[in-house]
Amino acid sequence: MTAEFFSHHETGIDQAQAAVGQNYYMITSMGLLDRNAPYEFRVNGLTLGALTVGMAWYNAGIYVTMTDLQTCYYINFPRTGSMQAEHRCRGVEIAPGRAAVYQPIGDVHMRTSGDYTSYAVRIERAALENALTARLERPVTGPLALGASLDLTQPAAASWARLVRLLAAEATAYQRTHRTALTNPLIAAPLHDAVLAGLLQAADHPDREALEHPVHAWGAAPVHRAIDAMHAHPDHPYTPTALAHIAGSSVRSLQLGFRRHIGLTPMQYLRQVRLEHAHHDLANGDPTHTTVTDIASHWGFTHLGRFATTYRTKYGQSPSHTLQQPPQR
């Protein structure tokens, strides 16, 4: 799983409608609230597996109508400006701090203010429903009855929105630098999983309480199955969902099992395994042909400062010092 980036800058309403349809959803009608207003539209975004995230800007107020989303859920929240929406016979007014949430079934009608900048999140329907199944002790059927809006000032929703902003910022930065860590599946896959899980934890839906109920962790066997997989293939782009599938457990049961038997979450344990492999590569690397950044990035460590601190705590020296030493025999 790696990111694919897109960018559009349009000055015609028809071209903007085509750009939105290409990356998000099909629009049945789109137009300017003031027909005489000049028009400009920009969007930078990325697609990561079942997830599409972007930040769009409209200089003038517009109206948008679209039919059933059918195969996806869609969430929109502004950075500047405001929007009025109607979906499934319910009206929603959003401004910074509140998001509109659209289900696969039901027409959507939207009207924006001028100078409207928003974050747009599209999630494939099957992926979000499977993510909920993986976190419960039973299968779920969709579409999920998500609440019509999301209060982004609440802790879980605020954390989810920060993650969305981070991905949108990465999409914008990519257009300038053409460099990104999201070409590394070890980094991209957990971020994808975190966005889906974060929305399920933040949004209102009938299974929200079930996600907060205590779960059972019957013995250490699922934990050992997950650990065996991590050590056998440490460079595989594991996510909490994937590890739970390997372990034959729900995500929450596996997390509880790891905390009970290991004292860490599955992803914390995986980072320790990858840190050991990074140490091995540094100790046996040739400093004339490789760098600390190369090795850290290969093992999914994107923040070099945190990597260096963690490495020094465990091995008592900096990564660069290890790399400069003669190779171990």
Image (spheres, rainbow, N blue to C red):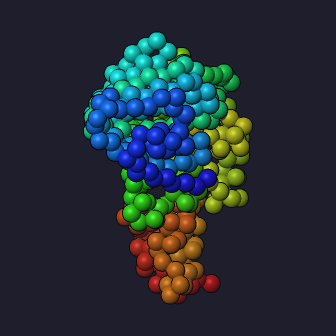
Residue 53 appearing in the image: no
Residue 246 appearing in the image: yes
Residue depicted at 57% across the width and 24% down the height: 68
Place residue 186 in its image quadrant.
bottom right
Residue 227 vs residue 235, the one in the foreground: 235
Residue depicted at 32% across the width and 28% down the height: 33
| Whole-percent x, y for residue 104 in the image | 57, 25
Residue 131 vs residue 145, the one in the foreground: 145
Residue depicted at 47% across the width and 61% down the height: 180
Against 261, residue 183 (above or below) is below
Against 220, residue 111 (above or below) is above
| Whole-percent x, y for residue 136 in the image | 62, 26
| Whole-percent x, y for residue 206 in the image | 54, 16
| Whole-percent x, y for residue 208 in the image | 51, 21
Against 167, residue 182 (above or below) is below
Residue depicted at 57% across the width and 38% down the height: 255
Q: Residue furthest top?
A: 89
Residue 124 vs residue 14, the one in the foreground: 14
Place residue 327 in its image quadrant.
bottom right
Place residue 311 in its image quadrant.
bottom left
Against 264, residue 257 (above or below) is above
From the viewer's perspective, tell me whether residue 298 is left or right of residue 232.
left
In which quadrant of the rendered image does the C terminus lie? bottom right
